[in-house]
Image (cartoon, coloured by chain):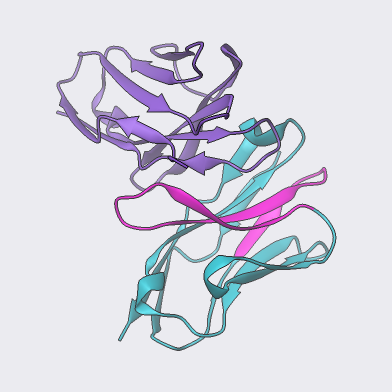
Amino acid sequence: AQSVTQLDSQVPVFEEAPVELRCNYSSSVSVYLFWYVQYPNQGLQLLLKYLSGSTLVKGINGFEAEFNKSQTSFHLRKPSVHISDTAEYFCSLMFSGGYNKLIFGAGTRLAVHP
Amino acid sequence: EAGVTQSPTHLIKTRGQQVTLRCSPISGHTSVYWYQQALGLGLQFLLWYDEGEERNRGNFPPRFSGRQFPNYSSELNVNALELEDSALYLCASSLQDNSPLHFGNGTRLTVT
């Protein structure tokens, strides 16, 4: 069975510090991987996606993620965070069958402090 | 381009009642997805509609149902509400299967 595990439920960090949000997945078939962000009282917004090709994926707002097949990970990174990055971040995967089988992790709450 | 719109934004219902949530996809999008985001449980896939047909449903009881209209808008109906149905219900749309999902801001349902 396919699953997504976000290893940290909460990540506190100071402004301008680097951050890494960890995501591991489990799948017996090829997968596509995504990171979404949810700001307070809003829906989810796609940050970045890995479908194929280069394992380093750059997204919006200065975020990037690296697909590591051997470690089955897709960690999200940003070299310098801002207060406005405070939000909930969701890692998700899709396997055969399209987006209707998009599986989400439990989420990581990133709290950026001044 | 108008995004995915959901209504109402907030709703309070009593246990045992029925509720209908509405979603309008982005213009041109034919697929609509419903997710439940309950506190501490992440996003759980509820239903997928495409071209007016229910294509797939998640592991939810039959009292969760819905439909998609000819204009691709969608309704989610929940009968016999239970306290644990309290959650944020998110609707998403996509141009077609395998293209990125665009989410609405959700409907916050509180069951008392």
Q: How many marks?
A: 0
Which residue is rendered at x = 25% and y = 36% of the image? Answer: B9
Name the image quarter holding residue B112.
top left
Which quadrant is the N terminus of chain A positioned in?
Answer: top right
Q: Is residue B74 left or right of residue A21?
A: left
| Relative depth, front residue between A61 and A88 | A61
- Where is residue A113? Give x, y as percent: 32, 82
In the rendered view, would you say B75 is above or below A65?
Answer: above
| Relative depth, front residue between A30 and B4 | B4
Name the image quarter holding residue A40.
bottom left
Name the image quarter holding residue B111.
top left
| Relative depth, front residue between B100 and B18 | B100
Which residue is rendered at x = 39% and y = 40% of the image? Answer: B37
Q: Which chain is purple?
A: B
Which residue is rendered at x = 63% and y = 54% of the image? Answer: A34
Magenta residue span? A23-51
In the rendered view, would you say A42 is above or below B3?
Answer: below
Which residue is rendered at x = 44% and y = 16% of the image? Answer: B61
In the rendered view, would you say B82 is above or below A71?
Answer: above
**Residue B103: in magenta span:** no
The rendered magenta stretch, by its main secondary structure, is classed as: strand
Image hue for chain A: cyan
Q: Is residue A65 left or right of residue A110?
A: right
- Where is residue A66? Give x, y as percent: 72, 69
In the rendered view, would you say B38 is above or below A7?
Answer: above
**Residue A42: in magenta span:** yes
- Where is residue A24? Give x, y as percent: 65, 60
Q: Is residue B63 left or right of residue A61?
A: left
- Where is residue B83? Give x, y as percent: 23, 28
| Relative depth, front residue between B89 and A57 | A57
Which quadrant is the C terminus of chain A positioned in?
Answer: bottom left
